[in-house]
Amino acid sequence: MSELLIRGGTVVTADWMEAADVLVRDGRIAEVGHGLETAGETLDAGGHWVMPGGIDTHTHLAHPIGRLGVTTADDFYSGTVAGAFGGVTTILDFGLQDQGGTLSGARDGRLEVIRPDAVIDYGFHLIVTDVNAAVLGEMPGLIRSGFPSFKVYMTYGDKKISDDDLILLLEVTAGNGGLIYAHCENDCAVTHLIERHLAAGKTGPAYHAASRPPAVEAEATNRAIMLAEVAGAAICIAHVTSSGAARHVAEARRRGAPVVSETCPQYLVLDDSVYDPAGGCEVAKFVCSPPMRARHHVRSLWKALEEGSIQQVSSDHAPFRFEGQKTGGCGDFTKIPNGLPGIETRLPILFTHGVASGRLSPERFVELTSSGPARIFGLDRKGSLRPGADADLIVVDPEREVDITASMLHSNVDYSPYEGMKLRGFPTWTVSRGEVIVADGELRAERGRGRLAERSPIEASELP
């Protein structure tokens, strides 16, 4: 029997916050209370907050971009190490179905890639690209076996599915405890605008954002929600960036529809000024889809977080190196791999700009970064400090401030979009299943120690 006692801290959950000790036994939460004792290791958490470990349900590690012939710069070792230093104890990544392939084949292939490398616990959504009778028939079994969520793209040519296919997928998930996780942009409009920009000679990185305006996100978000309502299905809207998309989610929830959504740190602290043409190729660092928006959209997202119409904040960590990957599209923005690094800075950004600024309560912070994601995606043993839950915790000094530079982060990327920011919320200790894996800036985790996280079918009535 192994024990770990975290003594003298302020415990923060999604429901309450008070001074308490946390006793861990054999990798699970044993007790939360006062005056607890152990013969095992003790962490002195005086002056610290003790919270459930972060759950990042949107990462792209070792993820190939076929049309460009590149792969994200973090594999499952460097990416999960970066996550651990940023307080992440569980990730949900993606397994991509090949055209003509099966979902079970995508699952098995992805597990082979992840198992040898991950230092924290993991799962993944299956990306459906080829909808047919066999695939629809596979889905109920996958849901029951711990893979209940399916990512779909309403744009991106080689991954895009049609509305006809989307409603078929929604009907299957509705009847079997699954969840569709949708990237919402109107493909027709995006393709049209890209062609118009290129024809006009507007080819540099600064024109990426103009080819994907807020309206294309809002329209597709509303369409996905409406199709889900027709099918009687729950749906999760990925990376909400605009006031229009956030409004559609809020309206659907007021109607009682089982709709949940996420946003990401980049959309909360950056805006469309990063796409200034005067920035030249440097602008490529900020190319992601959907892109950053005007400042009034940023304000709308914070309001949605405060009011509860956005239920989680994920990183959408899609790390590409600037030199040699992003720079390959400096003369044609369609050749820039889309995505930003952010797995390590997600919690500190939300802590600094949410909790420390007074926008969010500490309890709401835990709900958005851990407890909410666990409920949305069926991670029953994660995201809480109740007895019996996996002992995934972070111990944070709320006053310690860190100056962000690419060199102090652990992702295999040569820049940070948050360079120069001062952030609070980095953990002093990160604990995964009762094991201290980061301590005072030192990695203690062995490569491959992460495990496949257990997941249950998703009940629409239990969504946040």
Image (cartoon, rainbow, N blue to C red):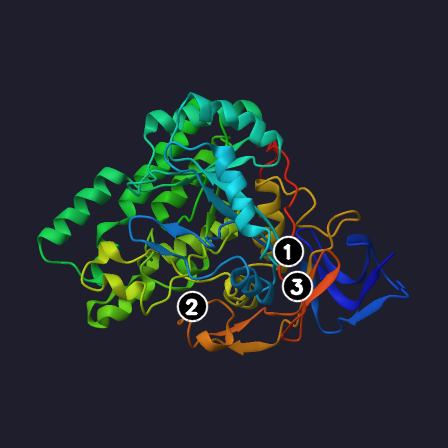
- Identify the image quadrant of the C terminus: top right
Would you name the residue on which mark 3 appears? Answer: 446
Question: Which SS class for mark 1?
Answer: helix
Give percent across and percent down for residue 226. 39, 29
Label 3 near label 2: C-beta < 8 Å? no
Q: Is residue 359 visible?
A: no
Mark 3 vs 1, N-terminal side: 1
For disc 3, the neighbor class at 10 Å (few under 14, some 14 to 19, many from 20) is some
The residue at 42%/33% (across/down) is 101
Q: CA distance from mark 3 to mark 1?
A: 31 Å
Residue type beneath disc 1: Glu
**232 sits to left or right of 294:** right
The residue at 32%/30% (across/down) is 162
Would you name the residue on which mark 2 appears? Answer: 413
Mark 2 vs 3, N-terminal side: 2
Nearer the observer, 450 or 54: 450
Question: Which SS class for mark 3?
Answer: loop
